[in-house]
Image (spheres, grey):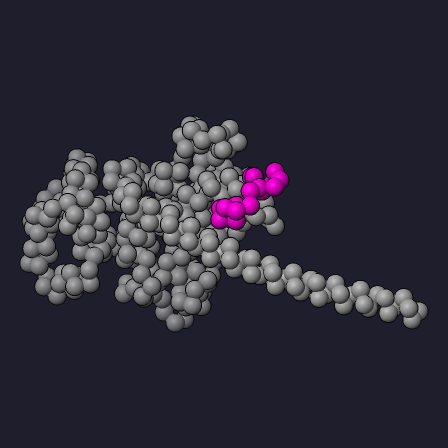
């Protein structure tokens, strides 16, 4: 696992391919030279290299050094060890909700309160490209033409991940992964009694997981022109507005850490990538608390809105074609019925 966290150091500290090759080819001297340059950077340069500002990075190092488990040694300083020790702070930056308090984002919004007062977050799966051997590649082929792993994650409404389960093959459905997450001996998903997550229609409606009505308008863009016309549409609209926190969280995560979002095949195995994804989620949570980057969040929101617009256009096109088919079918059926009654 430490090798994976070393890899995340490469991506967080030195995200360009050139710097990654430099670390590999030049060895310790180049690595230490790069770390020295980091200390001399201004905040913007540090942000470009580390995906976080200098203050956020310094505070993270201070937190980890304060545990007493990280200290400089003959081979590396604390900054270089940060990624190795991310697993130490899992319980600090990656916590499942206990359900004792209603999320503030719900309490402060009359569209959600008191209707979703027992909701503790949103849950969904997201795909990440992986490198696997040819003998198992078909198991990892799902929505994409290339192999992926399907990562199940839950988040709070401030876009922090509360549960992350990486490693499942891309062909595995979200519902199947969720069923496993609920019965695992290790890394089990826990839903407090009487509480629930919001999930999309890809999941089964059951205790602990509230899904939208099927065969009813759901996506936010679908209500941009035509307002809800009945109780189910109002529910779906507000469900979608709240549930899309998980889509936003995944969007910010992938934009902040390109190493896990690239469309090119990774050069490391799937197990290592799973550790890297978990490490990125932990860093994401820390940064959402001290350096959330509102510009990045706004960019993700614009892209999600654009994707929904494209989806709506596709749905309307399919609906129009379906209507044309229904008209044709109805005409043929009525002509048949007339001739049938005339001839019997």
Q: Where residue 338 sits: x, y (%)?
A: 85, 66
Residue range in magenta is 219-235
Q: Where residue 195 sits: x, y (%)?
A: 49, 34
In the image, taking residue 217 as reference, residue 42 lies left or right, namely: left
Q: Please, is residue 23 above or below residue 105 in the view?
A: below
x 48%, y 52%: residue: 174
In the image, taking residue 19 as reference, residue 150 lies left or right, namely: right
Can I make out residue 164 in this image?
no
Picture quadrant of residue 123 = top left
Q: Where residue 114 sits: x, y (%)?
A: 51, 28
Out of 113 and 329, give the one closest to the viewer: 329
Q: Please, is residue 97 above or below residue 27 in the view?
A: above
x 61%, y 63%: residue: 321
* Quadrant into which the C terminus falls: bottom right
In the image, taking residue 221 as reference, residue 213 lies left or right, namely: right
Picture quadrant of residue 56 = top left
Q: Where residue 225 sits: x, y (%)?
A: 52, 47
């Amino acid at each position: 696992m430490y090798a994976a966290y070393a890899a995340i150091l490469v991506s967080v500290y030195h995200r360009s391919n050139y710097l990654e090759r430099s670390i590999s080819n030049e060895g310790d001297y180049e690595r230490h030279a790069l770390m020295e340059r980091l200390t001399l950077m201004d905040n913007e340069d540090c942000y470009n290299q580390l995906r976080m500002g200098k203050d956020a990075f310094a505070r993270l190092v201070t937190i980890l050094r304060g545990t007493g488990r990280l200290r400089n040694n003959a081979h590396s300083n604390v900054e270089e060890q940060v990624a190795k020790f991310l697993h130490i702070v899992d319980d600090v930056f990656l916590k499942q909700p206990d359900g004792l308090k209603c999320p503030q984002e719900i309490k402060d919004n009359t569209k959600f309160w008191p209707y979703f007062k027992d909701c503790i977050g949103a849950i969904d799966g997201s795909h990440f490209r992986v490198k696997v051997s040819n003998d198992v590649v078909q198991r990892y082929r799902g929505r994409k033409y290339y192999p992926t792993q399907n990562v199940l994650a839950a988040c709070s409404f401030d876009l922090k991940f509360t549960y992350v389960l990486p490693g499942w093959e891309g062909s595995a459905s979200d519902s199947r992964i969720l069923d496993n997450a609920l019965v695992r001996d290790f890394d089990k998903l826990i839903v407090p009694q009487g509480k629930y997550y919001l999930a999309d229609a890809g999941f089964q409606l059951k205790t602990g997981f509230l899904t939208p009505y099927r065969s009813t308008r759901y996506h936010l863009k679908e209500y941009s022109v035509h307002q809800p016309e009945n109780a189910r549409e109002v529910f779906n609209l507000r469900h979608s507005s709240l549930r899309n926190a998980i889509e936003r969280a995944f969007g910010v995560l992938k934009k902040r850490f390109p190493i896990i979002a690239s469309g090119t095949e990774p050069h490391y195995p799937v197990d290592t990538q799973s550790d890297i994804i978990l490490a990125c989620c932990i860093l994401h949570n820390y940064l959402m608390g001290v350096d959330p980057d509102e510009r990045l969040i706004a960019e993700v929101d614009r892209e999600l809105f654009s994707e929904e617009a494209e989806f709506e256009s596709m749905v309307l096109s399919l609906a129009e074609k379906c209507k044309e088919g229904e008209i044709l079918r109805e005409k043929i059926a009525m002509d048949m019925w007339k001739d049938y009654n005339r001839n019997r």
